[in-house]
Image (cartoon, rainbow, N blue to C red):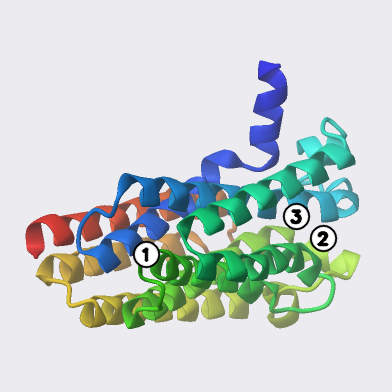
Amino acid sequence: MINKIKTYLELVKFSHTIFAIPFGLSAVFIIEKGFPSWEKIFWILVALVSARTAGMAFNRFVDRPIDAKNPRTKNWPSAKGEVRPNEIMALGLISSIIFIFSAYKLNMLAFWLSPMVILLLLLYPAGKRFTSYVHLILGLVYFLIPIAVSIALKGSIEISTIFLGIAMAFWVAGFDILYALQDYEFDKSFGLYSIPVKYGIKNAILISRTFHFITFICLILTGVFADLSYVYFAGVFILSGFLVYEHLLIKEDDLSKINKAFFTVNGFISIIFSIVVLLDVFIGG
């Protein structure tokens, strides 16, 4: 039983939930300028985790034939058959139901909008089969996170969360482009679409850098419209150093450090951002 649970957690890369949760919680504190009720925090966390789990399950289900042929992914539980296709889909459907229920517990507007998120989560894994800009579909999912938090807490959309959503969208789309560099040759040979395949490795890296510059600008604008203090802005400039470091790790002729940039540095970025927001709300204000 324990081994089966570990396999499921590996299937959906549960440890990578760290990318989404800190940004989602940061939106909570920015909007509330403090702590909302623990009940609200609980259901927001449930929504974040269940949505990501659903997305990863749908991704694994749709990509099984591709993952089994890709040298990088052929040992994943879904590709090796350690988890059956019906189990993967069941996980995705159950997670989707939990997500929709958590949206219902937050408020009715969030509930009625929740199917849109599920649709995007289904669209993303299919996207690489028809558009080079599939990374922006994933970005759109992350754009909706602070928007959804604003709706959940206020029943409306705060301007600051729009800029935070744009920042998150280009942050995740930017590092998804870098991650796709690993599959450049495979995707070309298999007829799959991505920004690296369309524009080449060098230009894809430049596009990723541009996306992350937009992230930096929008994080600044988030602080302006949320009326945050110098603590936040100082933190964002420190955060920008991590984005620069991430890109220094990736070179056109040496892609060996992509995993370090993707998993380690991006994990630090999301955690540091949440710490900066907390410091601003509870100290800087």
- Mark 1 or mark 3, earlier in chain: 3
For label 3, count other residues whose C-alpha is less than 10 Å away and answer few (under 14), some (14-19) or many (20+): many
Where disc 3 sits, the SS reads helix
Give the residue pinned by disc 2.
186
Please name the amino acid that badge 2 sits on: Phe
Residue 59, label in figure: 3
Q: Answer with left or right where residue 144 lies relative to residue 26.
A: right
The mark lying in front, picked from 2 and 1, is 1
Amino acid at circle 1: Leu
Q: Would residue 277 appear left or right of 197 to someone viewing this image?
A: left
**Residue drawn at point x = 19 percent, y = 67 percent:** 232
**Observer-nearest of 113 and 167:** 113
Rounded to the nearest whole Å, what is the CA distance between mark 2 and mark 1? 44 Å
Query: Depth check: 160 or 231 in front?
Result: 160
In the displayed structure, would residue 40 be above or below residue 148? Answer: above
Could you say which disc has been placed on residue 104 in the image?
none
Q: Is residue 279 left or right of residue 254?
A: left
Give the x, y percent position of residue 175.
54, 64
Mark 2 burial class by Cα count in 10 Å: few <14, some 14-19, many 20+: some
Q: Is residue 174 visible?
A: no
- Residue 233 in picture, x, y percent from top left: 19, 71
Amino acid type of the residue tagged 3 in the rendering: Asn
> Against 179, is 158 above or below?
below
Q: Which residue is mark 1?
A: 153
